[in-house]
Image (cartoon, coloured by chain):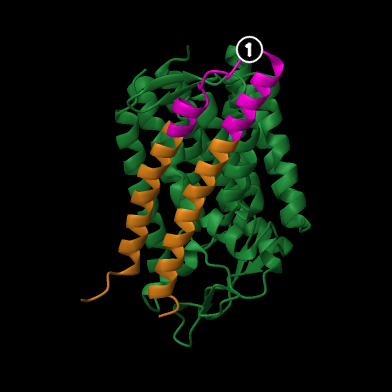
Amino acid sequence: MKPLKNFVYLILLVTFSWISLLLLTFAVFLLIVPFPQISNDFSGRVVTSVLKVLFSSVLSLAWLASLLLIRNYIARISVFR
Amino acid sequence: MEPLYLVIVLSLICFAISFLLISYSIIFLRKKGFVVEDFHKKDKILIPKPAGPAIFAGISLPLIFLFAYTFEIKYFAVFLSISIIFLIGLVDDLKVLSGKLKTSLTILGSFPLLFFGVYDSHLLFPIFGSTRLTIVYPIIVLAVIPVVANAFNMIDVYNGTISGSSALLCFSQIIPILLYGSYENVIFPLLMFAASFALFLFNKYPSKIFAGDSGSLMLGALFGASAIVTKTEIPSLIAFVPAILNGFFILASIKGVVEHRSIKARPVYLNEGGLLVASRDKAAPMTLARLIVADGPMSEKKASTRILLLFVYSTILAILTSLLIKV
């Protein structure tokens, strides 16, 4: 099979970024940020905030890692072929 | 609320001032010796730099007029924000700043937006509608100006890419504002479009002038500030995806923030025929510019057009996203 032009891969990468960025923002701002506090006391508020930051960071890092994996794949089949 | 004709007249004035001052800058900068080598040309020609002061004047004068005319603080806050970033860029054009210092200083550009409170902590999402981010939103505002300004600076790789992409990105704000925003806010992306288009006429392949850091950082700051003030954060973010990818790929390759002039291994080089070739050196950063030319040796004009096509595509996606936004 003839390989696709690199530019097509970049268009697909932008498309993937669009869909995944929307899903990521939905997940962070609509699911994690409004999540209710575990309890109303001080430690409950702190633990809830830490968990929100942790989950948001994990999702964001997973998104960035997926972009890097795709970039490395494109580089392998085009730049370093 | 400013009449629509005033918004259009001010945008035309912005274009005229930018166009005339860029024309004059080309002669002035060449005469004073403010020229740099165009690395992607076989004959290593010298190009005047920076065009930043010319486009800054073109954008600033209408903003100052609008503030004096309406006393609305948003015009002053945006003017102050882009002024700070412009000055940082100008210092970098005249005396090279380290990557870390330049990036850190650009955070100052966020302060006028935070200080004057010209933001609304409700974020408009496609399909789901609005969500309130009272604590998180000011942190987003603080990060937007440095991130967008520096990502803009990183896409200034080929002739016409910074000015062309900047002009295209404006549509990711103009159309959402006309769809669901307050139309007087369209002045911000319109001024950016007017100045960017004037620059594009001189900066497109083969470039007669380069934007410089003062131009690229300032346009980035204006795009970021405009996204916040006009409530077009999500469409702007989508349109900006190619620049985000480029910036992230560079940071991931070089593992940190460094001044681009200090990177020894070049991602793209010229072959004997004067065509751009993607370097196979593993130490060279994996930039968008390098991935674009990986299809084979190509002219700078073709590489620049391909980068602009990516921005056309991301801007269309941004407009599609804005159609899904419920107010």
Left or right position of B158 against B44? left
Task: Tell me which corner region of the image, top left, top right, bottom left or bottom right, holds residue B94.
Answer: bottom right
Q: Secondary structure at mark 1?
A: loop
Q: Residue at x 35, y 68 (%)?
A: A6
Which of the pair B129/B173 is nearer the observer? Answer: B129
Q: Residue furthest left?
A: A1
Q: Is residue B188 magenta?
A: no
Instruction: Answer with the quarter of the image where residue B136 lies.
Output: top right
**Point 64% across, 18% down: residue:** B117
Chain of the residue on which disc 1 is drawn: A
Report the magenta residues as a range. A27-53
Spot the green chain and give its letter.
Answer: B
User: x%, y% of residue A53?
Assistant: 60, 34
User: Disc count in the image?
Assistant: 1
User: Is residue A39 inside the magenta stretch?
Assistant: yes
Q: Which residue is mark 1?
A: A40
What is the letter of the orange chain? Answer: A
The x, y position of residue A70, in whole percent, is: 42, 61
